[in-house]
Amino acid sequence: VEASIPEPQREAWKRSQTSAFKSSDEFEKEVVRHVETSLARSMFNCDEKAAYSATSLAFRDHLILDWNKTQQRQTYRDSKRVYYLSLEFLMGRALDNAMLNVGLKDTAKAGLADLGFRIEDIIGQEHDAALGNGGLGRLAACFLDSLASLDFPAWGYGLRYRYGIFKQEIIDGYQVEVPDYWLDFNPWEFPRHDVTVDVQFFGSVKKVPNEQGKSVAVWEGGEIVVAVAYDVPIPGYDTPTTNNLRLWSSKASGGEFDFQKFNSGDYESSVAEQQRAETISNVLYPNDNLERGKELRLKQQYFWVAASLYDIVRRFKKSKRAWREFPEQVAIQLNDTHPTLAIVELQRILIDIEGLDWDLAWEIVTGTFGYTNHTVLPEALEKWPVGLVQHLLPRHLQIIYDINLFFLQSVEKQFPDDRDILTRVSIIEESQPKMVRMAHLAIVGSHKVNGVAELHSDLIKTTIFKDFVEIYGPDRFTNVTNGITPRRWLHQANPRLSELIASKLGSHEFLKDLSQLNKLELLVQDKEFKKEWAEIKFANKVRLAKYIKETTGVNVNPSALFDVQVKRIHEYKRQQLNIFGVIHRYLTLKAMTPAERKKQLPRVSIFGGKAAPGYWMAKQIIHLINAVGSVVNNDEDIGDLLKVIFLEDYNVSKAEIICPASDISEHISTAGTEASGTSNMKFVLNGGLIIGTCDGANIEITREVGENNIFLFGNLAEDVEDLRHAHTYGSHTIDPDLAKVFEEIQKGTFGSVHDFSAMIAAVKDHGDYYLVSDDFHSYIETHTLVDEAYRNQEEWVVKSITAVARMGFFSSDRCIYEYADGIWNVEPLPRRD
Ligand code: NBG
């Protein structure tokens, strides 16, 4: 607004206005222009990488025009906005998504062909944006797609890590981590060197009287780190709405380096401050469902939260509204407890800087925030030592103490005879050292708390947050079952299936209203349709088989049953159960006569996923999978009957190849441990069936697709505690089939007896916390049922179609509507004014 062009000159601007390409001719011109100018190359040195770069720049230009208009429209309307704060956004590739969402993929395909390139090769050049670990980060990415596609005025806020999640290499069967430097060429971000925020750390707090003689806190001293904004456009599907993901990058304040030190010849220390500042946004912590209490992590959190809130408050203040109206204009969603300091930061801004009194400020704060919990695992619940918070953020610790004081006073009033409840719910844990419990702070500072699937939302209410339900009543707690975007996970990942569905339903509308899939059920007896359906699955398996051959050298038969488990490696996700099951299958096949073997159904067991670098047991699981693979895959008795594959470096773009190619996927966590899971949804949406436990969203998937179209096994969440108790205090006997598997491992059949002994001991000697032995029999039996069902291909295809037809509920669009309605109270912005 400040620098707008005067009326008389605007005509000239309008005459010269940039317009986006529409035809393939115009697209080609843009590509050539970018090759020749932006990249300073020509047709004589344009390789696929350059063609990718130029294509991306052409689409980036396209997006930015829509982006500008969207931001203008949203500013002009000044309606309530949503801010999604997440330390992780696992975006994957952007080009294919941009082409499909703006509806110009065919145009680009024709244009690229004219210029001498195949569009798949060009898409394949892109490096994944991997700023996340797993489901939590990918959920944030799916939500951004839905928010834009549904025309919500929404921003994402995150960190621009220089290194995303590490690249995984498998060397001699072991995981080796390699840094993921992804920023050498990233056409999808716009640096905003003019959008910066000074973020303060350390220092001390002084109380000084203000003009009214009231004592106010002043936080002074310490050091300043500068946050610089990088904006990533998020195009909606089939709408001009293009939202913004703002990622903060850290840089030293006061320029590049200390000139005084430099001039006095001390070059090294002159850049030290710069390096220390840049460390903050340097690397994503590679843990999934684990918090390690590292100082740098807390610095990252505050850096990102402070910059984001400053930005949000700045935007609000432009509207000149009264502070009371803040929660009517701003909804902030906390993706897990990582951004919980935002609660404290907003309270600080309101009382220390804007001069509001505590109660009004607190009302504004709680009216603004919503908190999503993503796990009940104790090792993942965030806690910070009071001393560390005190040192890094002295004023924030005072405010946390005040929040806690007022909160505990009200609890005491409500439950005057219950001293214990105060200890249990306090934001400060009276341990040695004392700890700040971030989840408690997040609950106290939010008006809504939600879990991510029904079972999970029930569990948080009855276990970890039980006392808070007593205190606030059940209304503060709600459920929003996770979802996935059908644009990426069906249309982009499985174009043939998406086109087949579109041809039967008469349009692509289902991609915006996934419940329309239910009309497919009318076709389950249509022979031609079933045949095409099966052909597409087969083609997707052929594609994956080719990829397996290229990357592992192993030949797999695409007619075999493809059994897939891809996700982060974790004991609670139980890849160990899967590989023990594979060994059991191997032993069973080995014990058969050749004639018996001939009657068996061939299978390919496919694994993929990263282990956190410090998670030793998870790394042993990877090692065992690879060790089993090298024995089984080379056993001539076995041949095609069983192959065991570990796919290196599982990530979003690989998931797009893997999900469409599964017959069965495994979602086999110990009941009560997987909050939701979202890959379960991706696999079923692509026509694969599930073998799974009664855990997370598997339960609702069962409710939707019907018990006949899913393979459930294992103990229930309600029995887990008793079983664990019995393991420790009763006599603990191991399932006899599992015991045979252990014997085989210990005989050295798969090498490395020593390496694998801890995995076995966890089950045999250390209480089998994850109930591997308890569930083993039921797991094996259920796999037998899978084999039997798969033999009847006719029936299998019916199951597959029926399941897809009933998956409408799991669109992230449905989630976003539920958040918008039940938590944010925001509405979409009509596209045309
Ligand atoms: C993960 C859960 C998954 C869930 C995703 C998204 C964390 C802390 N939690 O089950 O383990 O699907 O969140 O909600 O990463």
Image (cartoon, rainbow, N blue to C red):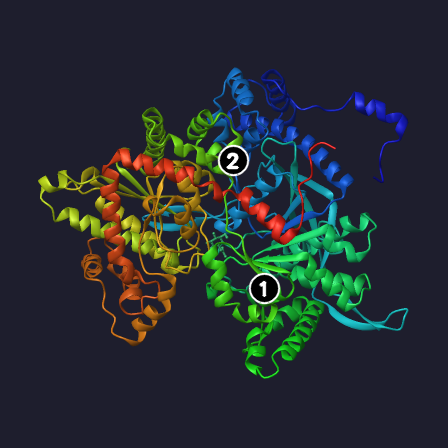
Q: Which residue is mark 2?
A: 487
Q: Residue at x 89, y 29 (%)?
A: 7
* Three-letter residue code for mark 2: Arg
39 shown above or below 338: above
Q: Position of residue 232 (x, y in %)?
A: 63, 40
The answer to which quarter of the image holds residue 729 is: bottom left
- Secondary structure beneath label 1: helix
Between marks 1 and 2, how big is the CA–CA gap? 39 Å
Q: Is residue 268 visible?
A: no
Q: Quadrant of the C terminus?
A: top right
Nearest to the observer: residue 588 or residue 794: 794
Badge 1 crowding class, 10 Å Cα cut-off, few under 14, some 14 to 19, many 20 or more, is some
Q: Residue furthest front?
A: 522
809 shown above or below 391: above
Q: Position of residue 539 (x, y in %)?
A: 35, 29
User: Disc 1 or disc 2, which is closer to the eye?
Assistant: 2
Q: Residue at x 71, y 49 (%)?
A: 256
Question: Is 798 on the left or on the right of 153, as rendered?
Answer: left
- Secondary structure beneath label 2: helix
Nearest to the observer: residue 634 or residue 485: 485
Question: Is 48 on the left or on the right of 220, as rendered?
Answer: left
Q: Residue at x 16, y 49 (%)?
A: 588
Q: Position of residue 606 (x, y in %)?
A: 32, 43
Q: Earlier in the sequence, mark 1 or mark 2?
A: 1
Q: Which residue is mark 1?
A: 295
Nearest to the observer: residue 220 or residue 184: 220
* Three-letter residue code for mark 1: Glu
Q: Is residue 366 visible?
A: yes
Q: Residue furthest bottom?
A: 417
